[in-house]
Image: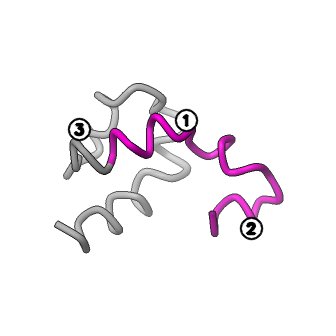
Amino acid sequence: MTIAKGLSVPPYVVFPDTTLIAFATERPMSRTDLLGISGVGQSKLEKYGDVFLAVIRQHA
């Protein structure tokens, strides 16, 4: 939500709910792991990957 607000876009533009649910259930720990999740492509990986990985690792 913070990223979306900062970009003035709806949250689904950053990642849709299905991708966020996959992050929570699969708990990717690397950029390669993130690319294996539906909804994460190279562009979104570059833009948001490290931020999401940091949060996932914090809660691992």
The residue located at (56%, 42%) in the rendering is 15
- Which comes sooner in the sequence, label 1 or label 3? 3
Q: Position of residue 51 (x, y in %)?
A: 44, 63
- Disc 2: CA contacts within 10 A as few (<14), some (14-19) or many (>=20): few
Please state which of the two labelled residues, at mark 1 or mark 3, is closer to the viewer.
Answer: 3
Q: What residue type is labelled 2?
A: Gly
Q: Which residue lies furthest to the right in this view?
A: 8
Label 2 – label 1 distance at C-alpha = 18 Å
Label 1 – label 3 distance at C-alpha = 15 Å
Magenta highlight range: 1-23
- Which comes sooner in the sequence, label 2 or label 3? 2
Q: What residue type is labelled 1?
A: Ser
| Residue corresponding to mark 2 | 6
Are circles 2 and 1 on residues that touch, CB within 8 Å? no
Q: Magenta residues: mostly which secondary structure?
A: helix
Label for residue 43?
A: 1
| Residue corresponding to mark 3 | 33
In the picture, the quarter occupied by the C terminus is bottom left
The residue located at (76%, 49%) in the rendering is 10
In the picture, the quarter occupied by the N terminus is bottom right
Indicate whether residue 49 is drawn in magenta.
Answer: no
Q: Nearer the viewer, residue 3 or 19?
A: 19
